[in-house]
Amino acid sequence: MVDLLSHLGGDLRRQLYDLAHAARIRTYGRAVYLRGLIEFSNICKQNCLYCGLRSGNKSLSRYRLLPEEILNCCREGYALGYRTFVLQSGEDDWYTTEKLVLLIAAVKQLFPDAALTLSIGERDDECYSRLYAAGADRFLLRHETASANLYRSFHPTMEYENRQDRLNALQRIGYQVGAGFMVGLPDQTAADLAEDLLYLQQLQPDMIGIGPFLPHRDTPLKDELPGTVEDTLDMIALARLMVPDALIPATTAMGTAHPNGRERALQAGANVLMPNLSPMAVRAKYMLYNNKICTGDESAQCRFCLEQRVKSAGFHVDMGRGDSLKHLSRS
Ligand code: SAM
Ligand code: SF4
Ligand code: FES
């Protein structure tokens, strides 16, 4: 794998993308699933070195949407056709298990035909179980990097072993689980990226989120180089080949790194887009990295912008729940 990664370029790279594209056509055809992303709190107790929401960033203005505001975002999203809502936040303990259970139950009662995805970081088994019992279907928790050394250097407040243990717990409980990693982290080598791919092959997640590392001006990594679109495309294509039935988003970070980054990701094996449904007033405050796209665009604008982009890349939008094939074959 390391050898392959260090020789990728020109023809070999084109062949890799073609193989990934063929694998995606065999599994999901030309469908691209849309998920409405609601960034409901930028308050975080963790201190990941790369992230603009880290607790050590004192220049960020913090916000938290209340359950009724989140439900309003879902109402708007449902009217725009979304049938998956992704609730994402920093690790914000104001949102206790009890509050989350009530929120999840309310979303599922209002929109019984929609899938609900959580991306709220690390919690204990009991919390994950109760959120699942309340109706949450899926959980995104990137492993971030499979290298113990890199993980430890970027996560002063978290444990390498615990991250992977949490992913195992989510799978055991029954969630459709999303893992994934950043490409181009400072000091990350081809061997580290190979470890990420092998970890995914072993975990067999339902979803795989891969995006370039992009620096944020108010973090310790502010002067580091960003990850490249090409390296990230390579990882997306290899992930598609190693876990062919995974759902793989063309991430917002890809769209930020290059104007056509998301389209290129779709052509290298990605098959999901996660446009923003957060209220306009808070968009710019969920700033994980500099220059994040879509912070000034209405939810409806993003919805239709993406429809055009998907078509121009040679695919079609599917507004269904878009469950993973792995999950469908399990149930
Ligand atoms: N707090 C939860 C967690 O960490 O799992 C969910 C929200 S967190 C902001 C979502 C993802 O953003 C992380 O998994 C990380 O990979 C990504 N992210 C954070 N900072 C980033 C950066 N500077 N560049 C690219 N991706 C970043
Ligand atoms: Fe918090 Fe997640 Fe950002 Fe880490 S990546 S600081 S856990 S929001
Ligand atoms: Fe948000 Fe294009 S996806 S404006």
Image (cartoon, rainbow, N blue to C red):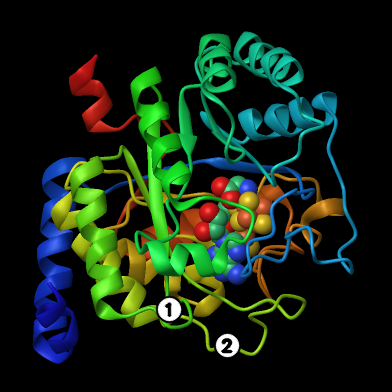
What is the spatial separation of the Cα atoms under label 1 and label 2, in whole angstroms? Answer: 10 Å
Quick one: 120 or 252, which is closer to the camera? 120
**Residue under pointer 1:** 184
Picture disc at residue 224? 2
The answer to which quarter of the image holds residue 31 is top left
The answer to which quarter of the image holds residue 315 is bottom left
| Residue 310, position as x, y percentages in the image | 40, 58
Count how many numbered circles sit on residues in the image: 2
Quick one: 120 or 106, which is closer to the camera? 120
| Residue 59, position as x, y percentages in the image | 89, 69
* Quadrant in which the C terminus is drawn: top left
Amino acid type indicated by mark 2? Glu
Q: Does residue 135 lie above or below 259 as drawn?
A: above
Give left or right: position of 142 versus 18: right
Q: Residue at x 20, y 56 (%)?
A: 198
Q: Residue at x 54, y 12 (%)?
A: 112
| Residue 209, position as x, y percentages in the image | 41, 53
The quadrant of the rendered image in which ligand 3 is seen is bottom right
| Residue 56, position as x, y percentages in the image | 79, 64
Mark 1 or mark 2, which has the lower sequence index? 1
